[in-house]
Image: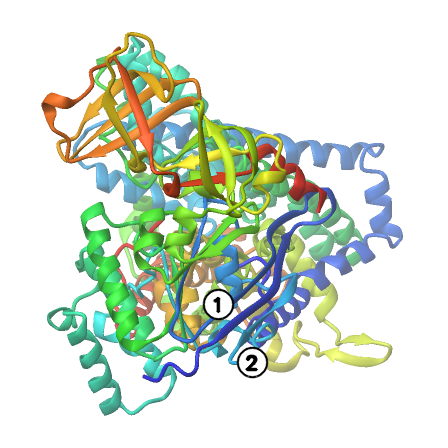
């Protein structure tokens, strides 16, 4: 639908230039440096020994095994939850839905630490109730925690697909004589295959990229991300870290590409926009009780985890000494975490609008303006989320701990590390921006595709320049996507950890890094209290952003359906 | 409004998409001169290039080659917002986040007119289109016809030199469409704005236009006023696309002394007007419109000269439609204001006749196609 053939106006050219420069410095250059450094001796030894060296091979195998296990379990759980939500009638459906989404913006470690407290060797439930002392550290604990943390991605993905399935398809199946189970098997499931594939791949990327949980609950189970982290924090060998990063980068990028450009194109779900009926509900008693049981168990588990986090913040040592106390908060707010709270919120607040506008700009260029290479541009914008955070953090540390020079001329100042300008906070903002703009980009693209391009053409034909049209017409029309992009950017920046660990300096202490330090020391009371502080900050400030944006925007909650 | 400005010239306008083997020619060397105040329609089946042509004139597509000149000034390198043209879109493209008033005022605000001027200009145009009472409504609170009128008001209020219409009526129901046709034509005449209208609906083209440009497969088949394209179509394609047609087999086509063509149809010798290539064609056909043919009952049991067997009859009240099987091919005849008792029933033999002045000799379709390919 884009105007194939019209020349780019100045505004478009400038926007394109801006995007290329930002993407170049915020992600491409750090990645390029990872590859460069991994060719140095200790890094290249890792890369070339990927299949021959026993230790490296095991780390790779551990990483892939974890990715596949979490991706499989998470997709299955996500589907059961989504199917129950879409096709079973029961009380409290909305609440279940919201609870299922909570883990998406959960602070790191909340799950890992709460699961240890509940189900670990001296867990409140495992030992307290069943007198069982399982070993959580390692593969089983990681799978459990990561599945709980990431299944909502599959849930959202599949729920969206289930809802856009034309109910008439199911009805056609039944009217041709198939019973409900047969319709489910022969119509619903096949139509969802791209959704399963997409969810599986997304979960795979998320789990191999995760760093926080392997540090806390991984035990001796080493994965690439935690090994790269150790290379920086134990071996102090940048090239070694770059080597492991390269090994992690490769599968992550390949899987991401498959997910974006293959799995999504395979999607056969017909989005007609006009559901022609109501979806057929599950009525079989057996199926219904199975679905509801799984859903209730999982949702209860999430509630249990959060209850543990909140309770644990207000008692001495949860499960051991359940006496009410405010000492954790007193300690944290009495000086230990004050700077971190201020700095984290401040930096996230700076990054949020930049990430939001940047995401919208890329979305607009991809959908409306760029003809050839729009997929490449889309991919460049998504790099920040496709590349594991650990890799980005190490890439930043390599690239920005010194000024970037070309032929002796500084083209980019030193922005990371304690000696950098503003105590290294610029690098952290840059990471926040590049990590969280892809969410806005996706929602912006989704919303733009719903808007008839003729609306923007009408503005041009009435004499408005490209920039004016973007400001007066496009931005107000995609303000819903913009808002959700902002909310995500803020929440994600506040909770992001893996790239940040490599960039914190004495001047820029970050909340998630404080949580890591406390979890490492086993001071779970402080971890829980910090998680509570983080959650409250996200809810309060997120709510304020919501109010502020809604107030300044024109009301555009009306549906805009393309006329043709 | 003076109608001195707004003369549009399109010179060998061409648009190609893709490269090499996948190259698709959307518009091929379209040349056209449109006079100030004239209403011209681009008519053709979907995919004929009419919308692409319009979008090149508007500036939304860059031509592969060719020129667009408005009052002598070449517009090709000008972006759409700089061109003094207004466009009415198929989907109306009203700004959903603005009221009717703000939609119409949009172009004036871009022109940086004072708010008092804007207010009176918008009020005037809303008044003229009976939209005043809807000024504060949002577009989604309007009916299709109202949205259409707002879109038209929004395009007109900036006083463009040329108005472009991209199938603006195709989303309306039949009754509203007919009404909007009249409304558009009246407003356009009153303001004297040069207009280009794209449609695939022949009724729209016939009823609105000063001239019709019939397009097919990226090229212009014919340019002419509504009577010319209907009575004197340049090709079988045009005849077939506009209105309903009978193409009768003819024999012994030759030039008559009068300058017309002499042909034998069903054993009867006729002198008919002919398209220029018709007499050099191996198998010319004779176009006779169904309403030009009259049908009467024949007494004979077997069809003779100018007779055929009735294979179908449909009675519509105000007219009756016959399908006759004849030696000259299947003939469709529309007889208006029929007397019910005189209708010839199915299976009976009927005599058909037509006035030779209402017929038009054309070269056959396949010959024209090969001629074009050679060019």
Tell which tag, 2 or 1, sits nearer the viewer.
Answer: 2
Q: Is residue A121 left or right of residue B120?
A: right
Q: Is A406 situated above or below B299?
A: below
> Against B338, is A223 above or below?
below
Q: Position of residue A347 (x, y in %)?
A: 49, 72
List x then y, in percent, for residue A435: 55, 59
- Describe residue A518's horizontal placement relative to residue B98 as left or right: right
Picture layout, residue B23 above or below residue A31: above
Left or right, A312 with respect to B346, comes to: right
Q: Quadrant of residue A389?
A: bottom right
Which badge, 2 or 1, comes first in the chain's sequence? 1
Q: Which residue is mark 2?
A: B72
Report the disc number at residue B58: 1
Under tag 2, what secondary structure?
loop
Give residue B370's position: percent from left, percent from top. 66, 37
Residue A329 picture quarter: bottom left
Q: Judge whether B128 appears above or below A289 on screen.
A: below
Q: Which of the pair A319/A139 is nearer the observer?
A: A139
Q: Are marks 2 and 1 in contact (CB under 8 Å)?
A: no
Q: Is there any visible trace of residue A437 in the rendered image? A: no
Please tell me whether mark 1 sits on a helix, a strand or a loop: helix
Task: Identify the residue shown where x is 31% and y is 61%.
Answer: A539
Within 10 Å of the Cα at label 1, are there few (<14), some (14-19), or many (20+) other Cα atoms?
Answer: many
- Position in image of residue A92 (x %, y %): 18, 37
């Amino acid at each position: 639908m884009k105007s194939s053939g019209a020349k780019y106006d100045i505004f478009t050219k400038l926007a394109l230039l801006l995007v290329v420069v930002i993407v170049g410095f915020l992600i491409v250059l750090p990645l390029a440096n990872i590859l460069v450094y991994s060719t140095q001796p200790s890094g290249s030894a890792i890369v070339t020994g990927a299949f021959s060296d026993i230790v490296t091979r095991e780390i790779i195998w551990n990483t892939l095994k974890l990715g596949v296990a979490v991706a499989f379990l998470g997709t299955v759980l996500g589907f059961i939850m989504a199917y129950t939500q879409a096709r079973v009638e029961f009380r409290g459906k909305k609440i279940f839905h919201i609870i299922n989404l909570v883990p998406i913006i959960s602070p790191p470690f909340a799950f890992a630490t709460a699961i240890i407290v509940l189900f670990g060797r001296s867990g409140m439930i495992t030992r307290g109730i069943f007198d069982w002392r399982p070993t959580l550290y390692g593969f089983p604990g990681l799978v459990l925690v990561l599945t709980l943390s990431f299944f909502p991605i599959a849930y959202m993905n599949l729920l969206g697909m289930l809802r856009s399935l034309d109910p008439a398809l199911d009805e056609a199946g039944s009217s041709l004589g198939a019973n409900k189970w047969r319709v489910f098997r022969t119509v619903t499931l096949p139509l969802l295959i791209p959704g399963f594939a997409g969810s599986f791949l997304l979960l795979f990327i998320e789990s191999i990229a995760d760093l926080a949980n392997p540090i806390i609950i991984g035990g001796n189970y080493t994965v690439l991300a935690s090994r790269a982290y150790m290379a920086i924090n134990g071996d102090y060998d940048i090239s070694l870290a770059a080597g492991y990063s390269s090994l992690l980068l490769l599968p992550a990028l390949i899987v991401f590409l498959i997910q974006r450009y293959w799995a999504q194109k395979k999607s056969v779900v017909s989005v007609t926009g006009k559901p022609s009926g109501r979806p057929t509900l599950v009525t079989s008693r057996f199926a219904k009780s199975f679905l509801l049981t799984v859903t209730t168990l999982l949702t209860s588990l999430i509630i249990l985890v959060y209850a543990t986090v909140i309770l644990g913040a207000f008692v001495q040592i949860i499960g051991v000494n359940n006496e009410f106390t405010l000492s954790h908060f007193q300690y944290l707010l009495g000086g230990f975490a004050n700077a971190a709270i201020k700095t984290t919120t401040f930096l996230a607040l700076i990054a949020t609008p930049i990430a939001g506008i940047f995401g919208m700009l890329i979305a607009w260029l991809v959908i409306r303006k760029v003809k050839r290479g729009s997929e490449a541009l889309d991919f460049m914008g998504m790099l920040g989320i496709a590349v594991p955070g650990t890799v980005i953090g190490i890439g930043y540390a390599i690239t920005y701990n010194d000024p970037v020079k070309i032929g002796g001329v500084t083209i980019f100042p030193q922005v990371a590390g304690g000696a950098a300008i503003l105590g290294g906070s610029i690098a952290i903002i840059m990471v926040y921006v590049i990590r969280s703009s892809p969410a806005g980009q996706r929602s912006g693209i989704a919303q733009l595709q719903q808007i008839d391009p003729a609306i923007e053409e009408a503005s041009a034909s009435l004499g408005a320049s490209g920039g004016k049209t973007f400001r007066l017409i496009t931005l107000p029309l995609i303000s819903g996507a913009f808002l959700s992009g902002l909310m995500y950017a803020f929440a994600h920046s506040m909770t992001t950890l893996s790239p940040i660990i490599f960039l914190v300096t004495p001047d820029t202490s970050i909340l998630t890094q404080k949580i890591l330090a406390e979890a490492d020391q086993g001071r779970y009371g402080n971890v829980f209290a910090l998680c509570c502080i983080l959650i409250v900050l996200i809810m309060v400030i997120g709510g304020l952003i919501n109010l502020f944006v809604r107030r300044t925007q024109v009301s555009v909650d009306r549906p805009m359906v393309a006329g043709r | 409004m003076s109608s001195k400005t707004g003369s549009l010239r399109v010179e060998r306008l061409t648009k190609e998409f893709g490269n090499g083997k996948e190259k698709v020619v959307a518009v091929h060397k379209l040349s056209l001169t449109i006079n100030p105040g004239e209403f011209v329609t681009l008519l053709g089946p979907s995919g004929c290039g009419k919308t692409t042509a319009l979008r090149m004139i508007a500036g939304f597509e860059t031509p592969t080659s060719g020129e667009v000149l408005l009052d002598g000034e070449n517009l090709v390198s000008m972006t759409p917002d700089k061109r003094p043209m207004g466009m009415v879109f198929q989907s109306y493209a009203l700004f959903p986040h603005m009221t009717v008033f703000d939609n119409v005022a949009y172009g004036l605000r871009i022109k940086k007119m004072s708010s008092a001027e804007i207010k009176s200009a918008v009020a005037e145009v809303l008044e003229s289109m009976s939209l005043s009472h809807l000024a504060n409504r949002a577009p989604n609170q309007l009916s299709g016809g109202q949205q259409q009128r707002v879109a038209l008001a929004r395009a007109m209020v900036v006083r463009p030199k040329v108005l472009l219409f991209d199938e603006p009526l195709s989303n309306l129901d039949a009754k509203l469409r007919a009404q909007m046709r009249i409304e558009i034509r009246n407003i356009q005449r009153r303001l004297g704005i040069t207009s280009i209208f794209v449609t695939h609906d022949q009724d729209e083209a016939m009823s609105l236009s000063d001239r019709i440009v019939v397009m097919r497969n990226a090229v212009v088949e014919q340019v002419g006023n509504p009577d010319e394209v209907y009575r004197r179509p340049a090709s079988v394609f045009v005849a077939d696309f506009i209105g309903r047609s009978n193409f009768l087999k003819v024999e012994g086509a030759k030039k008559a002394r009068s300058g017309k063509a002499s042909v034998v149809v069903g054993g009867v010798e006729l002198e008919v007007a002919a398209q220029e290539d018709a007499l050099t064609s191996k198998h010319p056909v004779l176009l006779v419109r169904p309403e030009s043919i009259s049908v009467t009952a024949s007494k004979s049991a077997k069809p003779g000269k100018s007779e055929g067997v009735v294979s179908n009859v449909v009675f519509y009240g105000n007219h009756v439609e016959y399908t006759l099987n004849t030696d000259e091919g299947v003939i469709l005849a529309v007889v208006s204001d029929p007397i019910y008792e005189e209708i010839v029933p199915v299976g009976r033999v009927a005599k058909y006749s037509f006035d030779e002045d209402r017929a038009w000799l054309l070269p056959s379709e396949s010959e024209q196609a090969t001629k074009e390919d050679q060019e």
